[in-house]
Amino acid sequence: MFYRPSEGHGLPHSPFSAIVSPRPIGWISTRAATGDNLAPYSFFNAVGYTPPQVMFSGDFSDSMMNAVVSGVFAVNVVAEAALLKMNATSAAFLRGTDEFIRAGVEKAECVAIDCPRVADAPATLECRVVKLVELLGPERLLLGEVVGVHIRDEYLVDGYLDPRLYAPAARLGYHDYAFVREVTTLKRPVLPAKD
């Protein structure tokens, strides 16, 4: 099968997000004058290492607006145990609704920024907004610099974060998810020095 996105695919649902998968889920928390907000973004990833930077993208809705106005946001890792609560926060609530309360998610305060975070998330990245980028269509992309990192101690083994202990959720296509339960370690090959 081949199709041009501008001409449609003829399938019951778009295969695009199923092709680009699995994708990590950025469970984005923000604060605004109207209250705290929590929403999942499956168009999320790390984009830089020094300094650490992340991005999330989607409609210019509450989370993104709040982050742009406040200048900060937090990215909470979604463990398998939190999948149903994460999904509950994806509903189109009215602006000003506190999704932490509606979904029964325990809230904690960030340290380096004025923002809420998911208290029992395996890890949380506290971020300062770097840039808002307009994309083709209605979506926007927000870049942030990571200025603080929370990691639950019970998920650190010999100095390494072990995802098998909390099974991070990843987004597939459609309404499907996957969880990290197996890990394979491969070190980069070292090429011999040239003469």
Image: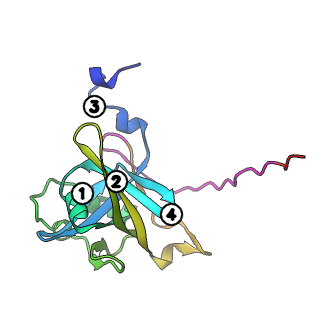
Which mark, by number, is residue 56?
Answer: 2
Q: Report the Cα–Cα distance between label 4 and label 3.
A: 31 Å
Q: Residue at x 32, y 25 (%)?
A: 5
Callout 2: few (<14), some (14-19), or many (20+) C-alpha neighbours within 10 Å? many
* Pick the front one: 119 or 124: 124
- Kindly identify which numbered label has been placed on residue 13: 3
Q: Quadrant of residue 10?
A: top left
Disc 3, SS? loop
Q: CA distance from mark 4 to mark 2?
A: 21 Å
User: Residue 54, percent across and down?
Assistant: 41, 58
Q: Secondary structure at mark 2?
A: strand
Identify the residue at horizontal 35%, vertical 48% (top origin): 43
Give the residue number, with chain letter if any, for mark 4: 163
Left or right: 101 as drawn, with respect to 135: left
Residue 134 position in % (x across, y down): 28, 45
Question: From which residue to which does the magenta span run?
Answer: 173-191
Q: Amino acid at mark 1?
A: Met
Q: Residues within 10 Å of mark 1 (few under 14, many from 20)?
A: many
